[in-house]
Image (cartoon, coloured by chain):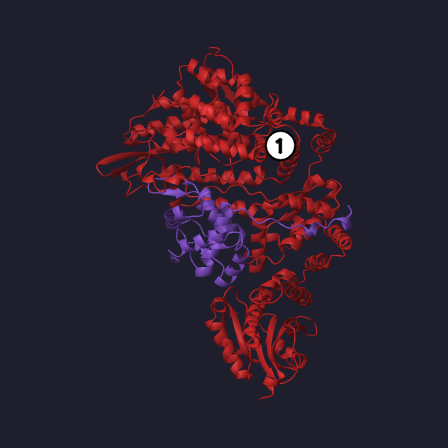
Chain colours: A purple, B red
Amino acid sequence: MAAENFDPFAQELRGPELTADLLGKLFILQWSKRHGKSRLPEKGALNRLFLDSYENAPTQVRQLLHADYRLQDPEIVEITDFLVAGQRVGLVERPNPSHVPCDTRLTPYWAGWFLDSYQDDFREELGWLDGVISKLKPS
Amino acid sequence: MPETKAFDLAALRSDLKANCPVLTKFFWEDLAKRSVGEKRGRKTKELTDPVWHSIPLEPVEVDLMDMPLLQRLRRVRQLGLAYLVYSGAQHTRFDHSIGCVKAASRIFDQLLAAKEAAGGSPKSEYRKVVRLAALMHDVGHPAFSHVGERVLNRIFDKELNLLFDRLDQHLPMPNAYTPPHSLKPAALTRPRLKKIPAAEIASVLLVLSEEVERLLADYGITNDNIPRIAAMIRGYPWEACGGSETVHDDFMRSIISGELDADKLDYVSRDSLFAGIPVAADVERLINQLTVLKVHEKLGDKTIDHYVLGIKRGGVAAVEMFVMTRAYLHDRLYSHPKIRAAEQRMERLLEQQGNSMEKPGFLELLYNDCGDDAVLDRLMRLNEKNGKTISRVFIKRNLPQRALALVRRYLAGYDNLSARLPITLTKAFEQADSLVPANLDTFNKAIAQIAGAEYPDDVIVDWSKPNPIKEDPALWVAQFHNNAHSKDKPPPPISAHFNVEQLSNAYQDAKLAAWVFAAPQDREKVAAAAALYFAEKLNLVVASEALDHAKIERSIFIDELKAARQRFESNKDVVRIADGLLHVLDDRLFIPAATFKLAFRSLPWRNEDVIQACDRLSQEISGINLPMCYYPDAEAAISALDLVLRFRQGRAGAPNPSWETEATMQKDFKTFVETDEVANSEFTVVEHAQVPLGITDIVLQSKSSNIQLVIELKSKETSLAKIQEDYAAQSMWYSTGGFGRISILLAQYRASDPSTPDADIAVRHNSDASLAVIAVGIPIPKATASKL
């Protein structure tokens, strides 16, 4: 391999795609930026929040979400992905079972720093998430 | 069979043909025509099966089973390439399809009887639809099962998306039950799935073919049932459920598409049996404990009876065991590193082949009548390069092997006691989690090139994650004393007992690793190249556990890392990162330069100046003689540096900065931290704090960790260098005894010449380099200072 003819380190990386995982992480980061280390609302409240905010969501978000229909309300299937993605990378800590609260880890200072990386690619989505989050308080 | 409004299949076919010509032509004009023949008037049959023991089939099912449509599946292995690791895993999609018929029947019969017991009138006419859906749910699987499916997804991405949308528009049944409470938001009723399931769409296309319609009609099954079968395969409830305005058979959807559906019940049992992995799932008990619960809803002057899937109290443990078993099989079988390596290598081969030939020809290859091995054989003959690769990798079984594990707990800085990564490293991992999947080709190619791999196409970065197990499934627990449920007082959901799905997701998370694979000959050099690339691009610094987990000899890895360093010695960034990795393997503190950008993010510095300062600080801090477990100390110091530099900017950047005494500085600094929204969110300030060796000016207490950090403030009419020389030791002295090992000295000094911001930041160590201080100067021009 002729390293002198090609510099693989110079390859630019493409920005991330919006997936349910990433939307979940952005939600948790945006939440942490507003509320710091806190307790996320329980799943039912999160579900209602996303359902209520669905019509105003950016197109990419609307294409991502889908519902499982339950007796009480439709349930956003991706709520599982949101929390599992946050748990996997270390943004939330989740005791079991799910009606036991779910705690976020970052202070607004750090959450803001994480979000710096996504401001250019997902400005609209982050604005929407901030609006969604403003409707709820930590439980 | 249920009688429903006639469905216009001809219109559906004509629209799909016009919009999705390649796929519809292949599945309808080629595959269906040659795979589905005339009715042969078969009799019922009873098959012997290792999972369900005996599976009785109806004449129409026997006829379908004996046609190439299903016979092809006898040569498509259920688990793709898992047999290369578990030699018993030779069972096929055919075995699974037949097993699903039995599982679906068992669940259906159980639930129908339960519905009758709950006061509902049973509708046994759906039995045939359920069984046919189970029998045909996998007929669209290509060779190598999900491996082939993922390649189809990539190569036919646009047409599959279009098909998905068109099917959405055509398939809703006009007279299916529509729950009134689910109408808002309407757009959510037809969402885009995150992954278009190619094999499922192919199965639906085959079910919708003229040939299947004709055959079913010959057995008296009218064409309005065909979209119902299709809806069951797609997992859409309303079309599948039937019902009426006042009765909602919600439980029906759970038979073919749910957390305890026939598909899962069969594959968990069958896969574990054939792979030889003993599991604890008690499917027999699980089915016997399923029930139907009636939930009454009053809606204006209308009432609706919902019949939902329930589990008796005695079956809760069986559900939990089943869910845990699925998670366990993911670890042992579906996500086994060797199987993942083999699958990824085959995917790459198939994708290269697919991109180099006409699309219909590629479909013909993947859906050939002779299955998996025929594809291998044809690939070998199609071109010499592929032939050599298949011979080397699959025939002689030189599968790519693990070179590096990329897991949170195997990254440098991970704290085993708290099971956490420091925050800056959490960010690096979080970024990697978003960026690597979007840049896999770049990562594969770059790592192969850095390594100079002998087999570059065997270098595979595998960052795939299984879909999480759906938490809070639609399953309710039957109560002994209370069977009168209403929408306002529903039965308790199973998750209220114990959320085993959440536990399973945590288990999968703990077990799952992202990997870098490479040919056996290339393992160590690819490991070194990958470690270098991930550190340089994403600040992900692996610890030696990442090597152990991949069975990479540490000393050879170090040699390869040094060799790579030498090959790229003209690139200073790479050299620094390589040195940092060597540092970490020696369990010494290393902070990548990019991490220091945090401290400069709010400053109006030129990017080049920031990079230069970060590089210098990274080198100087990494010169401290501390193990990697002190990373949080450095992290706290960097975030404090951010705070201090912003404070400095406010003072030194002012038009006419005034000279301040130390007491005023201290007061100003405290006010700054307490009133600044960003600073205040991270630190609390303690003035004149008592430390073991005296009283220091300021102690910052981090809100993110238990780190306390000493800040000494000085205001001296002398040069910064002199202040550093005189007082750096004092700051470090105060930092002993439980404080962060890196302190900060903030010094107002007399600047005789204009200084560059970078020159105002310096790092000093103590004699044994076990402590450090970051000294930050606030220059006050001589004229201003002299006024004092």
On screen, residue B697 above or below A65: below
How many numbered marks, from 0 up?
Answer: 1
Q: Quadrant of the C terminus of chain B?
A: bottom right
Q: Position of residue B601 (x, y in %)?
A: 57, 64
On screen, residue B468 above or below B775: above
Farthest left residue in view: B301
Q: Position of residue B576 (x, y in %)?
A: 71, 60
* Residue B377 falls in image quadrant: top right
Horizontal side, residue B400 vs residue A41: left or right: right
Pick the residue in front: B444 or B340: B444
* Residue B740 falls in image quadrant: bottom right
Q: Chain of mark 1?
A: B
Q: Position of residue B148 (x, y in %)?
A: 59, 31
Would you name the residue on which mark 1 appears? B81
Q: Amino acid at mark 1?
A: Leu
Horizontal side, residue B117 vs residue B66: left or right: left
**Can see residue B518?**
yes
On screen, residue A110 above or below B62: below
**Can see residue B197?**
no
Horizontal side, residue B689 vs residue B299: left or right: right
